[in-house]
Image (cartoon, rainbow, N blue to C red):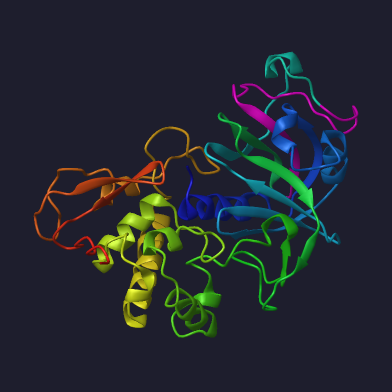
Amino acid sequence: MPELPEVETVRDGLERHIIGATITRATVLREYSVRRHLLGPEHFVGQVAGQVVTYAARRGKFLWLGFEGCDDVLVAHLGMSGQLLVRDAEPTVDSQHAGNTQPAGDSQAAIVAAAPVHPHLRVRFDLDHPAGKRVLDFVDQRTFGYLAVTATMPTSDGLAAGWGTEQPVIPDLAAHIARDALDPAIAPGTPGRKALVARLATRPSAIKRLILDQSVISGIGNIYADESLWRAKIHGERPTNTLSKPALNRLLDHAVDVMGEALTVGGTSFDALYVNVNGQSGYFDRSLNVYGRENKPCRRCGSPIRRSAFMNRSSFWCPRCQPRPRPLT
């Protein structure tokens, strides 16, 4: 599943390649991929056609595109396998090559598919960019991702909603998501960081569960949680209210470092499903210290890395650097 660095890599690519572009035509090849647009695919197509993209923003794993002179935004959630791919436009071919699904919307808004067509193409946008005509494809093999045009609402703290925007408004679909670890509003020393640490310090839940809770802090997924906990020398089952505020700050600082390092190389890829907007995979997995390294020596102390079950997934940790907390008696 794409995590915060992967999604930020996609956001950055959208910012560099489609800002200033006009969406001239669009097609929905799979209606389920716009299921969160409650008025249906035809309305979705009508809402985006003719819009000029002014910014690409992100909070946690939610992406959205802002439009010129419009309060609504185009929200994208990549789910487990979603990709947003940008390329120069190609000569078009008959739309029947796009698969068995039929485009939704009227003929003015729909487009025929350009060759070659990705087998998991779900939604396509034709773009008229100052640098030339381009195509933005939403590709999603497992179909957990979605697109929707939605209204916005003011942020609760009056600050910019996330990376890539100075607007203090957030899509209503993402309003329940807390600020993420890379957000300047919760950088060290800010009122936002102090409030977050104070909130964490009172919670009895295991620390890994809390840093994965998107309503507490967003964007930290299973891989980066394990890496951050290893760097901070904290076991994921440690009750959060037994950690000091300096320890909590240290953990959050490590989370920022881990994801920042992953961001510089485009994220973590274990298969071909995660790619950036140009179709290139990240390779931070080569730098992982604990995740996926069961029985391999800890790179800090040499002890064999252990794996334990965690919320239908796995946790990886070092028994010497991250001793398991003793059970309460």
User: Given the current orientation, which residue lies at the most extreme left position?
Assistant: 302
- Observer-nearest residue: 286 or 12? 286
In the image, what residue occupies the spot 40% across and 60% down? 259
Q: Main secondary structure of the magenta part?
A: loop
Total label count?
0
**Residue 147 point in image, percent of width and height:** 70, 42
Image location of residue 103, percent across then percent down: 80, 24
Magenta-colored stretch includes residue 5? no
Point 40% across, 45% down: residue: 282
Query: What residue range appears in magenta?
Result: 104-130
**Relative to residue 98, is residue 14 depicted above or below?**
below
Q: Residue 281's image quarter?
A: top left
- Above or below, 56 relative to 186: above
Q: Is residue 94 visible?
A: no
Does 31 appear above or below 18?
above
Q: Percent from the top left, x then y, of residue 169?
A: 74, 68
Quarter of the picture holding the C terminus: bottom left
Q: Is residue 4 left or right of residue 315?
A: right
- The residue closer to the viewer here, 282 or 207, is 207
Above/below status of 86 relative to 305:
above
Residue in the picture at 39% in, 71% down: 252
Closer to the camera in the image, 55 or 60: 60
Residue 188, horizontal then vertical, whole percent: 44, 80
- Residue 113 falls inside the magenta stretch: yes
Asked if residue 61 can be seen in this view, the reply is yes
Between 204 and 169, the one nearer to me in the picture: 204
